Amino acid sequence: MADNENGGGEPSATGGDDSQPKQKSAKELAKEAKRLEKLEKFKAKQDKQAQQPKKAEGEKKKDAKKDVDKKRDVITYNIPTPKGEKKDTSGEMPNAYSPPYVEAAWYDWWVQQGYFKPEYGGRDGTKAKYEDKFVIVIPPPNVTGTLHLGHALTTAVQDTLVRWYRMKGRMVLWNPGCDHAGIATQVVVEKKLWRERQLTRHDLGREKFVEEIWKWKEDKGDRIYTQLKRLGGSYDWDRACFTMDPKLCHAVEEAFVRLHSRKLIYRSVRLVNWSCTLNSAISDIEVDKKEIEGRTLLAVPGYKDKVEFGVLISFAYKVCDSDEEIVVATTRIETMLGDTAVAVHPEDDRYKQLHGKFVQHPFFDRKLPIICDSFVDMAFGTGAVKITPAHDPNDYDVGMRLKLPFLTMIDNNGNITKDCAEFSGMKRFDARKAVLKALQDKGLYRGTKDNPMVVPMCSRSKDVIEPLLKPQWYVNCKEMAAASVKAVREGELRILPENHIKTWYQWLENCRDWCISRQLWWGHRIPAYFITVDDPSIPEGDPADNAYWVSGRSEEEARKAAAENFKVTEDKISLRQDEDVLDTWFSSAIFPFSIFGWPDETPDLQAYYPGHLLETGHDILFFWVARMVMFGLTLLGKLPFPEVYLHAMVRDSHGRKMSKSLGNIVDPVDVITGTTIEALNESLQSYNLDEKEYKKAIEGQKIDYPQGIPECGTDALRFALVSYTAQGRDINLDVLRVQGYRFFCNKLWNATKFALMGLGADFKPTPTMQVSGKESELDRWILSRMCQAVELCNKGMETYDFPMVTTAIYNFWLYELCDWYLECIKPVLYGTEEEAKAVCRNVLYSCLDVGLCLLHPIMPFVTEELFQHLPRRQADSPPSICITPYPMPADFQLRDTALEADVDFAQNVIKTIRSIRADYMLVPKMKIDTYLRCADDATISTLKKYETLVSTLANTSTVHYLREDMAPAGCAMLTVNAHCEAHIMLKGVIDVEKEISKLETKKDSLGKQLKKLQDAAAVPTYETKVPEEVRSQNAEKMHHLSTEMDRLITALSTLSTMQ
């Protein structure tokens, strides 16, 4: 699979029945992109010159520099077309492909016509069979942001599948939606309030603050939908959902109440990821794990100076009633204020005499037991570990196991609590310094050393996460997780790529209960109420006690339930609703059925649940996918989908994770429309970066996009993303490589424009695709290759092998149809044999028609534009390519592998002759005598069938076939294969002395380049100081230069015999 993501390939050099076309390497593809770019620029220059009046020689020289600096005008669609009306394609096609022109008007027309709705054509989802439908839901993006290339990948992959299934005749529903993004949205609006009005949310109060968020959402919330439409996503917009819509709020409330009534949701005091800046618990996915190698100073919100991390501080606890001491080490020295024990391994001989004894806390009248626990690593540090159960996850487990005291010494704001002597009221990281100083003063400090570690940081506030004990609501995941594991083990749920199944088992088999409380104002307020009973016989409740909480769909329902629980009348009950909101992932977990109106038995729920596929990134396999499976099975008794496909993560061209601080996050619209480096720099100002990060991001953008990002268009971006999607691999996306596929679009455009001219204005295709029996070998060859493309595209779609699809399409259009077939049929189309012309035209039409349909799921805009220029086979043919039947292998049974092998042989002969011509710098128009020396008569017989092809594309004057005889003197030769040599006559055709001089000059130039690289590689520090990537590039350059030098030496040797 190493090269699959390149999406390109050449016709096979060996012939035969290859199951998949040969693929180009990344460097070959980049070279191809450059070649296409040059061709496009040359074509643009020719078009421009053709439109201008002839100038005198003097004027040409005068304007030469000016012409070089001018940019070609952007071609746009300017015909007045009301929104939703069909685009006018009656005029002549522009001379070149232009994304703004091509992408105009189509999307609104598709939506207006209802093509994206499952009911299109009058179908009823409640009556259709499950296998006749295809239902998929969007992973709802956060309402706060704009889409990045990761979202674009999701959209491209999903829409490719959606459009494919739609063209296959399925009832397709792709349901869009947006997530309310609790923490992210609240942070954005809080910052906006402070920036614009110097107000906090507490100044406004909860109700008014939530109103402000809704105002912001209505003002900014459509940005994401605009981007999704720009990317061509064929969603059913009438079913778009927002997770705070009344319908979805009702579903969230119902899910909580049902799960609580089944005791699958309960209240407990446990450690949570606490953001002191946000004053809220946050989920694991909102925790960034910052890896540091040793002592590092990090900026922390609320601190003027940076805070030290990455050191291990050792200090001593004195053993009570003894002269002994135990030395422990910690990366968070301030937490020793909350220590309640010291642990050693029961088998550690160093401490056996201390089992059951105590140590004295140096700052408090607190004795800490020395406990034994096998979790202690005897080989790490001193083998003794301080235990702070209220502030460390591992220590929490020990504390629960051994029933240790839990002492909270850091409060919600990150300050030391009031019962911590002289440290009380200090900020936690100020206390870090103060505690260390106090230990030194008491003579208990034993040293500091660097320590690699991971610092957990809040992705929203950039604060360091503090584990704190909090009473929160939890989902009991044990039984639900077991059912989800069983579904995969028994084959009811399929996860692809299969390497993620192991992760699925590991996570769910070791799944902890899920904390769903968030101390926010924006989100789904928890429908749980704390009970106060006006009855002296009933003790006052503890907010951490489950018995004093009740849930309900309304306060009235909750009061009734509370009265029943405590056996009192309802008037004795007072309720206080929990102030917290639910974790955003809770509403996401019920998204596949809440969007269809659950818990109500709606027609949509009946028709479209369960869905058919869940497609998303592998990073949220547990946070979203597993929870949807758990809730679907628990609340509806059905899996929400039978199959999960997880695409790779998008990284930048250097393999780095997309990050605001690196400046490598790219808006897909910037790739579609193009942007300047100045605009990219300006976009960084919205990222809240500190000065150092901002400068680093600016430099990163300058290196990656010195000229900005060129306009690539939606189709090129989609094709690039899909072609990169090799299963199980992350995607190192070079945005500039997307431009190569923009040139591919231009090739499609020019090929179709040429083909339409060849078909003629009066051409009418046959009602169905059929062969007449009068097709030439080249006609039959291109039909055979077309059938192979159809087979590969369907196979790739079915198995989610998207590089197989893009490679097959790219090869068929670029290398087989454009480079070979169109070139070969020019003499036929412009000739006088009408019967051959008619046959050729029908074959050409079939190639265009099928080729566009194969490509449409990935490149919707350019294929629709070109499709509308083609004549239709029948009057009642579908009005749009997006509802035209997709080519299926059963309908395309014209594969002829023997013929393909013969044509492949002829093509290799042509390539060999072209290679010789290039070696000796022969001008393209120069016709030359060619001698093909063959090993047997069968080879000669095969080549004679393609003599016209060879003569036309290799530009030969005469082709001579040799069996036993040698080629005449004065020829240059290259081997085609074991059965054939190609000789071309140079003597008398070229100026030998002049050619020798040119080749010597070129040889000298290449020699200097090669020596420069060899000298650089010979430097002793080359291997250690030069990055591996650069060394690899240099090695490849040296290989290519050496190969070219060898060919020049051979050519010079041949020429010397002609002097």
Image (tube, grey):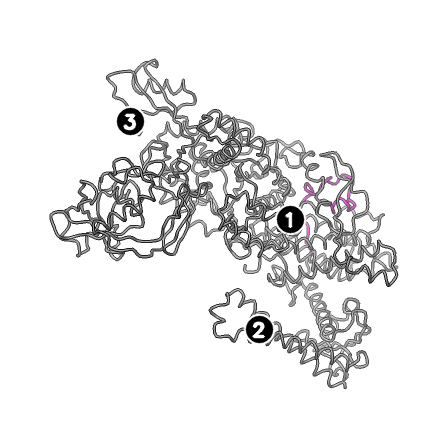
Look at the image and tell me whether residue 851 can be seen.
Answer: yes
Looking at the rendered image, the disc whose residue lies closer to the viewer, 2 or 3, is 2
Q: Is the magenta stretch mostly helix, strand or loop?
A: loop
Estimate the x, y position of residue 737 in percent, counting from the top left: 62, 56
245 with respect to 93 (left or right): left
Amino acid type at mark 3 = Asp
Q: Residue drawn at (17%, 49%), measured in percent from left and top?
A: 318
Give the labeled residue for mark 2: 1013
> Which label number is shown at residue 776?
none
Give the labeled residue for mark 3: 542
626 with respect to 771 (left or right): left
Spatial CA span between label 1 and label 3: 59 Å
Estimate the x, y position of residue 1044 in percent, counting from the top left: 65, 74
Q: State the extent of the magenta-drawn residues as a range.
A: 865-894
For the C terminus, the image quarter is bottom right
760 with respect to 513 (left or right): right
Number of marks present in the image shown: 3
Compare marks 1 and 3 and give the one earlier in the sequence: 3
27 or 667: which is nearer to us?
667
Look at the image and tell me whether residue 478 can be seen.
Answer: no
459 or 64: which is nearer to us?
64
Q: Label 2, secondary structure: give it.
A: helix
Q: In this view, does 570 lie above or below 958?
A: above
Q: Where, by quadrant of the figure, is residue 1001 drawn?
A: bottom right
514 or 520: which is nearer to us?
520
Amino acid type at mark 1 = Thr
For the N terminus, the image quarter is bottom right
Looking at the rendered image, the disc whose residue lies closer to the viewer, 1 or 3, is 1
Estimate the x, y position of residue 732 in percent, counting from the top left: 54, 55
> Which label number is shown at residue 675?
1
Q: Label 1, secondary structure: give it.
A: loop
